[in-house]
């Protein structure tokens, strides 16, 4: 398979796995099997084990000492902050709300690219940014949930903060992928992230009643760890080796389609006019942000 084609397939699979993850993670947390921070710690423990086992079969690269600072920052934004905010927010909002909020990611990446990489923002892109954020506000202010205990506004704010954190992570690791093979640094990101998350999730993991788990719960937890953590964090850097950060970010608009379809099919979420209006606003914003010609990847 052509390297660029492989990169596009990889980033598409990442969005499919993330899209399904909204429902599986929501189910595990809302049914009381695992609290959000406990699930984050399980994700990281599982990924650490898998990545370090995989590392035994990979060629070894020497890491420049100065790059460990970049590793640390990537772990802060891409592992600890990103995951804690995402699952903490998802517990309080719905899969469709969370996935729609996540498609502000390409807009956030564009803003950061302008601030830190001096990429010019055109008038059309400014309109796109405003439309995208308008959709996020509509969803947060007017969105409702049928589940008692949900706090849509707080949950959406946390998911949005996670999207900001994830966008910073994508920009940070873009530089690392140009220098190292992804397996060289991903194992370190998760190991560093483990120590960051341990104080938050330790008590929650201690409280897990494993004997209450049914096969579907084990499958859901396994999917969150293997599918939505190990494979997504392995495939994203592989895609970034051949694609621009903004291109990878644009694929995130597939998430609400995948997440919404699956959540409705599983009966854990519903569609309404507010969600449709918000989705159209954000889709329009992402389209305008992505519309202008870019240099070839």
Image (cartoon, rainbow, N blue to C red):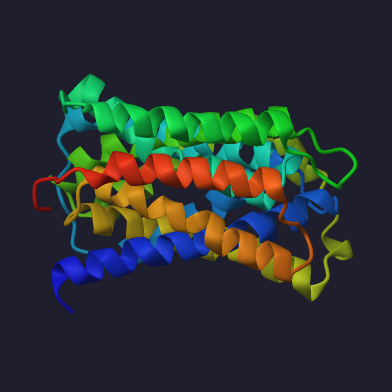
Q: Position of residue 169 (x, y in %)?
A: 36, 36
Point 27% across, 41% down: residue: 173
Q: Position of residue 165 (x, y in %)?
A: 44, 31
On the question of residue 103 being in view, the answer is no
Q: As displayed, is residue 243 above or below residue 54? A: above
Q: Position of residue 183 (x, y in %)?
A: 28, 56
Say which quarter of the image contains residue 14: bottom left
Residue 73 falls left or right of residue 276: left
Residue 49 falls left or right of residue 110: right
Residue 18 falls left or right of residue 41: left
Point 62% across, 28% down: residue: 157
78 or 89, nearer to the observer: 89
> Residue furthest toward the bottom?
1
On the question of residue 175 being in view, the answer is yes
Point 78% across, 60% down: residue: 268
Q: As displayed, is residue 55 above or below residue 78? A: below
């Amino acid at each position: 398979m052509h390297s660029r084609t492989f990169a596009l397939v990889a980033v598409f699979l990442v969005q499919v796995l993330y899209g399904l993850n909204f429902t599986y993670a929501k189910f595990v947390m809302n049914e009381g099997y695992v609290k959000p921070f406990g699930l984050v710690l399980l994700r990281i423990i599982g990924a650490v084990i898998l990545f370090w086992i995989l590392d035994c079969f990979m060629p070894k690269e020497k890491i420049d000492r100065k790059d460990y600072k970049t590793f640390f920052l990537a772990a802060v934004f891409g592992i600890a902050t990103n995951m804690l905010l995402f699952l903490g927010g998802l517990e309080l909002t719905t899969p469709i709300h969370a996935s729609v909020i996540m498609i502000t990611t390409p807009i956030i990446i564009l803003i950061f690219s302008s601030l830190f990489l001096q990429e010019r923002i055109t008038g059309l892109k400014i309109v796109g940014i405003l439309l995208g954020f308008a959709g996020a506000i509509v969803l947060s202010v007017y969105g409702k949930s049928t589940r008692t205990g949900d706090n849509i506004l707080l949950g959406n704010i946390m998911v949005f903060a996670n999207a900001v954190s994830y966008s910073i992570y994508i920009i940070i690791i873009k530089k690392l992928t140009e220098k190292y093979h992804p397996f060289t640094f991903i194992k370190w990101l998760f190991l560093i992230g483990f120590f960051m998350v341990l104080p938050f999730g330790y008590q929650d993991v201690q409280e897990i009643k494993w004997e209450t788990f049914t096969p579907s719960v084990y499958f859901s937890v396994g999917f969150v760890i293997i599918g939505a953590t190990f494979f997504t964090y392995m495939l994203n850097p592989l895609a970034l080796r051949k694609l621009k950060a903004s291109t990878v970010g644009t694929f995130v608009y597939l998430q609400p389609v995948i997440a919404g379809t699956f959540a409705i099919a599983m009966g854990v979420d519903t569609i309404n006019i507010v969600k449709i209006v918000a989705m159209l606003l954000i889709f329009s914003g992402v389209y305008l942000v992505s519309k202008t010609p870019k240099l070839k990847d």
